[in-house]
Amino acid sequence: MYSTSDFRRGLKIELEGTPYSIVEFQHVKPGKGGAFVRTKLKNLATGRIIDRTLRAGEKVEKPDLEEKTMQYLYAEGKQHYFMDLETYEQTFLTEDQLGESKNYLQENITITALFHQGNLIGVEVPMFVVLMVTKTDPGVRGDTASGGSKPATLETGAVIQVPLFINEGDKVKIDTRTGEYIERIS
């Protein structure tokens, strides 16, 4: 079991039989009454975010989660297919279940899959991925002194902000936690 003093971003907990990941938390000590913890929790099965307030020192369960290394195969409609690298079994998740992770999936990428009570509920993509820019406006010469940025569409359909010198066909490194541009890969 975890206590509220163990809370940190990304910690996986279980409330009422449902696994959650802590998005944000704040310890509050009002002048009157007992201390409490305000949390934003992401439901690992549905991707929905809820707000929950817990008393300070309250205990929460550790979820029964299993992690497996899997390979992303392909998308068909709104379903994305994955293969277990040990048993070669295939399973899928919908775009709603994937959430923001779908923006960083490319064929044959290795991911960590989360299983709760034997059911696939989500995936964790690598911290950094390299994707190709498929559409962006050309940068104007001399327009880089301000260090500006422009929107760029990646091969997965995600739209991110990139520096003005990035062109279509360039490969860029992306931080999947924040969705931010890191560097151009030559």
Image: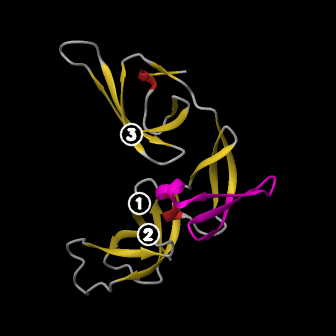
Residue at 38 percent across and 79 percent down: it is 166
Please give the count of numbered marks on the rendered protein: 3
Residue at 45 percent across and 24 percent down: it is 6
From what the image shows, is residue 126 above or below residue 150?
above
Kindly identify which residue carries mark 1: 179
Kindly identify which residue carries mark 3: 50
Kindly identify which residue carries mark 2: 158
- Amino acid carrying mark 3 in the image: Ile
Q: Quadrant of residue 72?
A: bottom right
Q: Nearer the viewer, mark 2 or mark 3?
A: 3
Q: Nearer the viewer, mark 1 or mark 2?
A: 2
Question: Over which residues does the magenta segment extend?
Answer: 71-100
Q: Is 138 within the magenta?
A: no
Marks 1/3: CA distance?
A: 22 Å
Report the front residue among 1 and 138.
1
Marks 2/3: CA distance?
A: 25 Å
Q: Earlier in the sequence, mark 2 or mark 3?
A: 3
Residue at the outermost right position? 87
Asked whether the residues under the numbered discs 1 and 2 touch, taking CB atoms below 8 Å apart as contact, a structural biologist would say: yes
- Amino acid carrying mark 2 in the image: Ala
Residue at 63 percent across and 50 percent down: it is 112
From what the image shows, is residue 4 above or below residue 127?
above
Q: Position of residue 79 (x, y in %)?
A: 60, 64
Asked whether the residues under the numbered discs 1 and 3 touch, taking CB atoms below 8 Å apart as contact, a structural biologist would say: no
- Amino acid carrying mark 1 in the image: Gly
Q: Position of residue 173 (x, y in %)?
A: 47, 66
Q: Earlier in the sequence, mark 1 or mark 3?
A: 3
Q: Quadrant of residue 116?
A: top right
Image position of 11 (left or right of 180): right
